[in-house]
Image (cartoon, grey):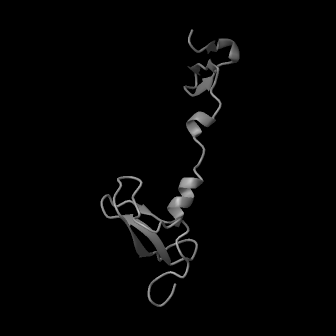
Amino acid sequence: MASNGRPNNPLPFPQPSGNRICMRCGGLLVTEYYLDLQDDSGQIGITGLRCTSCGEVVDPVILRNRLNQTPDLLHGTKQRKYAQRVDRGESGEPHRSGPKNDRQLGD
């Protein structure tokens, strides 16, 4: 970061020559410079865009996380074809009964 408080590296996202428009509300995006003293990467100065209407902030980390989203765990897992019964035996601890006692969902 230079001595004037501005970062040496430009923003990693495209900068249109005209008005910058917020994707959330359509408001005006302005450039802001943030100081993060607890950043894990060692970077202190962060340049971002902030919407003057709704307050949405977009910076390089936010953009990277939006582009590399985690998979949807709800739909990415294998769903069981059969329901499993939970039987509380003499010990009171739940345990699954064998497949012979399972029944198909929808029965």
Quadrant hosting residue 19:
bottom left
Q: Residue at x 57, y 41 (%)?
A: 72
Q: Residue furthest front?
A: 18
In front here: 84 or 91?
Answer: 84
What is the x, y in percent for residue 69?
Answer: 57, 50
In front here: 39 or 68?
Answer: 68
Quadrant hosting residue 4:
bottom left
Q: In screen coordinates, is 98 left or right of 20?
A: right
Q: Residue at x 69, y 12 (%)?
A: 100
What is the x, y in percent for residue 61?
Answer: 53, 64
How many numbered callouts? 0
* Residue 88 visible in the current orientation: no
The correct choice, above or below, for 57 with respect to 33 in the image is above
Q: Residue furthest left?
A: 53
Q: Residue at x 33, y 59 (%)?
A: 27
What is the x, y in percent for residue 71?
Answer: 60, 44
What is the x, y in percent for residue 90?
Answer: 58, 21
The correct choice, above or below, for 81 with respect to 15 in the image is above
* Residue 84 visible in the current orientation: yes
Q: Quadrant of the C terminus?
A: top right
In front here: 49 or 37?
Answer: 49
Q: Residue at x 57, y 77 (%)?
A: 42
Q: Residue furthest top?
A: 107
Quadrant hosting residue 86:
top right
The correct choice, above or below, for 19 with respect to 33 in the image is above
